[in-house]
Image (tube, grey):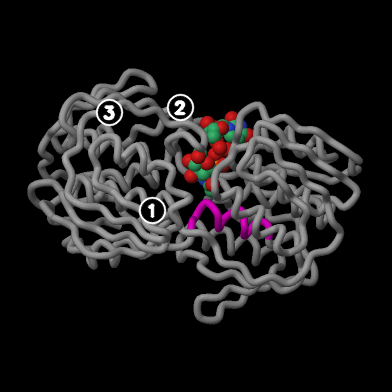
Amino acid sequence: MRAAIIGETKVRGEVEVGGAKNASLPILAAVLVNSKNINLKRLPSLADVDEMLKLLSASGVKILRKDDIFSFSYSELKGDLSDIPSKIRASILLLGPLALKTGKAVLSYPGGCNIGKRPIDIHIQGLKKLGFTVDVEEEFIKAEFLKAPKEVNIKLPFPSVGATEHLMITSSMMSETTVCLSNCAMEPEIVDLQRFLNSMGAKIDGAGTPNIKIKGVSSFSNVDFKIMGDRIEAGTYIILSLIANGSLIINGIDRKFLNYVDFFQRIGAQVETEKSRIIVKPSKITSFKISTAPYPGFPTDLQPQTTVLACKANGNSIIMENIFENRFGHVEELIKMGAAIKRNGNIIEVKGPKKFKAARLIGKDLRETAAVTLAAIIAEGKSTIENFDILFRGYEKIAEKLQNIGVNIIL
Ligand code: UD1
């Protein structure tokens, strides 16, 4: 889908963030642990969420929707989902739980954004330690559950968000087993997953720290659960407000998830947080140095948008991408608009401040498309963005929300 954006917009008004994509996907995978009634609130309307719902439904989960509440339950599960192509990387989170429930699971190899190699070795090694055999055959991945260990320690070689979640969900229902995970990812979405599993009766402790202990249980109870707000969506709107010299109020996000606000304040942003909203005022941004890192470091999911901010900052900025080696698709597009960016491996040097002029832009991965959209909103003239619908994977009602804060966007 192509979008046209008429630039030089000074955004103003209020925007409400949706439920977090990166909390919703593992929480949906965790639905498999419990056949009873699960009610989820604030599940965002996103293409990636729809993909996960499709996989759950194919495995036998009954999904009902009433207003903004999604209900899940099942009586029997099917483990072979190999006939469904997986468009999202998070589909891998279904492997352990499905294999445990059905004995053997087969999934098509996980897809997702093309931003680097994205191997799944940490998931596979972890499942093997939990008593599974795992085989990757061409475009399929198979797991079979053999025998539960009594106690197992698993040290992750890298704090992978997905692997931490996958092993937490799988271990939570291994009633004979106690699992100690170390070097875990500490993202707030993992804390939300723990909150969800524990509210159904799981025994998990430590999410949000590098060490997570899971004592498996044999049964789970009904639950009503509300998903946390999306901190990456919130951060994207903060950056939009800053580059567009705007005044925005961003609602629906708990301030405790916003550890990146300090960084924006340090470089001159007038950003204040209240309990569940963010207030951004017109600001003068100075150049900066930033490296992406696992939480509590600066999120890689805000790196492309932050590159646009660097183009507007006063002076030369340096941005280092340490999580996904290929997450620089936006750079070429921003250069078309007049940005001065030099890339050297995983580091870019950005000369600011630069004025953008409209261009014909191409959306690549989700966050890169977000970055070029931000740039088009402030550019002089009318830009077009090919593949704009990539944004529907991770930004709920994006066109509508942008229109509400003054952006002239035509789909
Ligand atoms: C999650 C987020 C994604 C975010 C990323 C990093 C979801 C649905 N997605 O992705 O938005 O950009 O965290 O914050 O929550 N790795 C391996 N082997 C593995 C697993 C990962 O080498 O088995 C590497 C990856 O290639 C990458 C790094 O570890 O370089 C981080 O990946 P990971 O934390 O697993 O990210 P995801 O869970 O895929």
**Amino acid type of disc 1?**
Glu
Q: Which residue is labeled 2 in the image?
A: 322
Q: CA distance from mark 1 to mark 2?
A: 21 Å
Q: Is residue 114 left or right of residue 138?
A: left
Instruction: Indicate the quadrant containing the N terminus: top left, top right, bottom left or bottom right.
Output: bottom left
Residue 156 percent coordinates (x, y):
68, 31
| Ligand 1 falls in quadrant | top right
Instruction: Indicate the quadrant containing the C terminus: top left, top right, bottom left or bottom right.
Output: bottom left
Asked whether 85 or 134 is in front, the reply is 134
Q: Is residue 64 left or right of residue 150?
A: left
Residue 152 percent coordinates (x, y):
84, 36
Q: CA distance from mark 3 to mark 1?
A: 22 Å
Asked whether 175 or 392 is in front, the reply is 175
Q: Is residue 28 magenta?
A: yes
Tell me which numbered mark, 1 or 2, is placed earlier along the sequence. 1
**In what element is the residue under mark 3?**
loop
Mark carried by residue 288 = 3
| Label 1 CA crowd tier, 10 Å (few <14, some 14–19, many 20+) | many
Asked whether 282 or 73 is in front, the reply is 282
Identify the residue at image location x=56%, y=66%.
226
Q: Main secondary structure of the magenta part?
A: helix
